[in-house]
Image: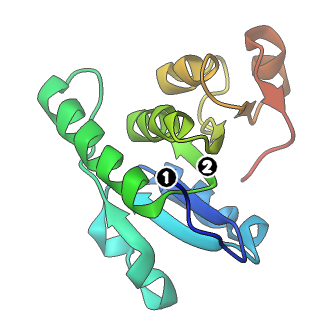
């Protein structure tokens, strides 16, 4: 299916709750001029003018395989519905899954690992290294030893 012609890029910003969401909110200025859709694990994040572009998916991790499958199905539906030009994730598992799915439709992708991962990349970021166009660590030493990129910290 062909993407419709657009006048501005469409970004799908994918984030789990808590610190991942806080870091995504810090990136908002970078999305200026784009049509931004958010995929989140917490429906209460849908506030203000962004409320119409918030998509909720179930939170999951490697220890909850059934929820991980439900997460994958829901994110596939979101990616196919939004048809993003770019997917940016601040983590966690759902962010990796969205990036993997978005690559299948030709979207550009970036995974930004949490600032909390000061010694090593998260599992999701390590998986994203083989899939995403860019994987960023917020710690120079972690980037150096893992092959991720360092471009500064979000927080």
Front-most of 74 and 8?
A: 8
Q: Which residue is mark 1?
A: 14
| Position of residue 10 measured from the top left corner of the image (x, y, whole percent) | 62, 65
Q: Secondary structure at mark 2?
A: strand
Q: Are the two marked residues, 1 and 2, in contact with CB atoms closer than 8 angstroms?
A: yes
Residue underneath mark 2: 88
Position of residue 87 in the picture relative to residue 56 (left or right): right
Q: Is residue 17 visible?
A: no
* Position above or below: 43 against 147: below
Coordinates of residue 103 in the picture (x, y in percent): 56, 35
Label 1: which secondary element: strand
Residue located 72% across and 77% down the image:
7
Q: Residue at x 50, y 40 (%)?
A: 91
**Residue 126 visible in this rendered orientation of the protein:** yes
Q: From the viewer's perspective, is 93 left or right of 20? A: left
Residue at the farthest left position: 66
At label 2, counting other C-alpha atoms closer than 10 Å, the crowd grade (few under 14, some 14-19, many 20 or more) is many
Q: Quadrant of residue 84?
A: bottom right
Q: Nearer the viewer, residue 35 or 140?
A: 35
Q: Is residue 57 left or right of residue 106?
A: left
**Coloring applied to the structure:** rainbow
Position in image of residue 93 (x %, y %)? 40, 33
Q: Residues within 10 Å of mark 1 (few under 14, many from 20)?
A: many
Residue 33, percent from left and from top:
76, 78
User: In the rendered image, which quarter is residue 139 located in?
Assistant: top right
Q: CA distance from mark 1 to mark 2?
A: 6 Å
Which is nearer the N-term, disc 1 or disc 2?
1
Q: Indicate which disc residue 142 carries.
A: none
Location of residue 26 with respect to 68 vertically, above or below: below
Q: Which residue is rendered at x = 41% and y = 49% of the image?
A: 16
User: Residue pushed farthest front?
Assistant: 1
């Amino acid at each position: 299916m062909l993407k419709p012609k657009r006048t501005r890029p469409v970004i799908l910003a994918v984030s789990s709750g808590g610190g991942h969401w806080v870091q995504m909110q810090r990136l908002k200025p970078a999305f200026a001029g784009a049509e931004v859709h958010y995929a989140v694990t917490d429906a209460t994040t849908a506030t203000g003018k962004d409320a119409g572009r918030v998509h909720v998916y179930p939170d999951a991790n490697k220890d909850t395989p059934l929820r991980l499958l439900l997460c994958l199905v829901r994110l596939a539906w979101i990616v196919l519905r939004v048809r993003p030009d770019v997917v940016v994730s601040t983590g966690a598992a759902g962010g990796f899954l969205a990036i993997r799915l978005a690559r299948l439709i030709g979207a550009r992708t970036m995974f930004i690992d949490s600032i909390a991962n000061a010694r090593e990349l998260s599992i999701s970021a390590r998986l994203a290294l083989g899939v995403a166009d860019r994987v960023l660590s917020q710690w120079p030493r972690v980037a150096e030893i893992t092959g991720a990129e360092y471009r500064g910290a979000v927080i």
